[in-house]
Image (cartoon, rainbow, N blue to C red):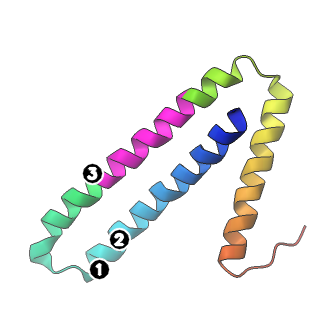
Amino acid sequence: SVDDYMQMNIAEIRTTIHHLMQRQALAAHCPPENMPRATKVLDSLLRDELSHVAYTAVLIEAKAEAADPEKFQDLFRKRLRDFNNITKEELGERVFD
């Protein structure tokens, strides 16, 4: 369903951000002689994750064509809000409305 695709897409975007953060951390701690190999691995992981983001976006777009625009936007906002709340909880922050 479009709901599942939205949740998947948001999670894949999150994973992409994690890959970018890992790259910075690795650069700070990786021995210089290992950095070229590590960069190749990270590049491969990032390409793979970005292809997942793109693929689920295509699926969402296809579903959106038949969806009521207002309901579609409401669902997206809800899923993004849910994602933000889960992330805040994982970080140990309380969510206040």
Asked if residue 8 lies left or right of residue 37, the reply is right
Quadrant assignment for the C terminus: bottom right
Asked if residue 22 lies left or right of residue 83, the reply is left
Asked if residue 41 lies left or right of residue 67, the reply is left
Disc 3 vs disc 2: which is toward the camera?
3
Residue 38 position (above or below residue 31): above
Q: Are marks 2 and 1 in contact (CB under 8 Å)?
A: yes
Dot 2 amino acid type: Gln
Q: Estimate the spatial distance between the alpha carbons at disc 3 and disc 1, rounded to whole Å.
A: 20 Å
Q: Quadrant of residue 94?
A: bottom right
Residue 19 position (above or below residue 90): above
Asked if residue 52 lies left or right of residue 97, the reply is left
- Residue occupying the point 75% across, 65% down: 85
- Residue occupying the point 67% across, 41% down: 4
> Regarding mark 1 in the picture, which secondary structure is present there?
helix
Q: Estimate the spatial distance between the alpha carbons at disc 2 and disc 1, rounded to whole Å.
A: 6 Å
Principal SS element in the magenta part?
helix
Please give the label number shown on residue 28: 1
Q: Which residues are magenta?
A: 45-58
Any magenta on residue 57? yes
The residue where tag 3 is placed is 44
The residue where tag 2 is placed is 24
Dot 3 amino acid type: Ser
Q: Estimate the spatial distance between the alpha carbons at disc 3 and disc 2, rounded to whole Å.
A: 16 Å
Q: Quadrant of residue 64?
A: top right
Nearest to the observer: residue 25 or residue 83: 83
Q: Residues within 10 Å of mark 3 (few under 14, many from 20)?
A: few
Q: Earlier in the sequence, mark 3 or mark 1?
A: 1
Residue 17 x %, y %: 48, 59
Residue occupying the far top of the picture: 66
Residue 37 x %, y %: 14, 64
